Image: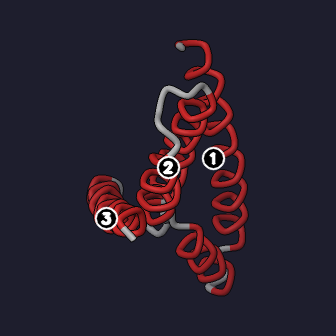
Amino acid sequence: MKYLLFIALGGASGSVSRYLLAQWTHAQWQGSFPLGTLVVNVSGSFAMGVVFALLERQVLHPDWRGVLMVGFLGAFTTFSTFSLEAITLWESGQTGQAASYVLASVVLSLLAAGGAITLTRALL
């Protein structure tokens, strides 16, 4: 039961962090392109790669997986929001922006996670 509470606390802090980062990004770069969500997903993917590598190398105790990966990062990354924003762009006739948003989100998030794993492994 205590483990579930830690996951819940991680999730609460992840969702608040997602909101704050997305709002800050939207305030800095206004426009119709959903840059805040892109920044959240890429940085969340990078963080997921770091945590994965730290757990893999046993630098973090396995209990941190639930708190950080399931709780914090599960709530921090926003692929459900990403999906809705991509569809909204598409339906509003902004097909180029929708396509570039989907491509950038997938490619940059994969590169961030892979780069983080490689970087963290190299530093350990």
Provide residue 85's location: percent of width, then percent of height: 56, 76
Residue in the foreground of this view, choosing between 73 and 79: 73
- The quadrant holding residue 91 is bottom right
Closer to the chain start, of discs 1 and 3, is 3
**Which residue is disc 3 drawn over?**
9
Residue 90, above or below 13: below
Find the distance from the CA under tag 1 to the CA under tag 3.
25 Å
Find the distance from the CA under tag 2 to the CA under tag 1.
8 Å
Please name which of the two marks, 2 or 1, marks the residue nearer to the observer: 2
Q: Which residue appears farthest toward the bottom when viewing the image?
A: 91
**Which residue is disc 2 drawn over?**
44
**Which residue is disc 1 drawn over?**
109
Residue 30 visible in the snapshot: no
Provide residue 77's location: percent of width, then percent of height: 50, 60
The amino acid sitting under disc 1 is Ser
- The quadrant holding residue 30 is bottom left
Residue 12 visible in the snapshot: yes
Q: Residues within 10 Å of mark 2 (few under 14, many from 20)?
A: many
Residue 54, above or below 15: above
User: What secondary structure is found at the residue carrying circle 3?
Assistant: helix
- The quadrant holding residue 92 is bottom right
Please name which of the two marks, 1 or 3, marks the residue nearer to the observer: 3
The amino acid sitting under disc 3 is Leu
Closer to the chain start, of discs 2 and 3, is 3
Provide residue 114's location: percent of width, then percent of height: 68, 34
Q: Quadrant of the image for the N terminus?
A: bottom left
Callout count: 3
The amino acid sitting under disc 2 is Gly
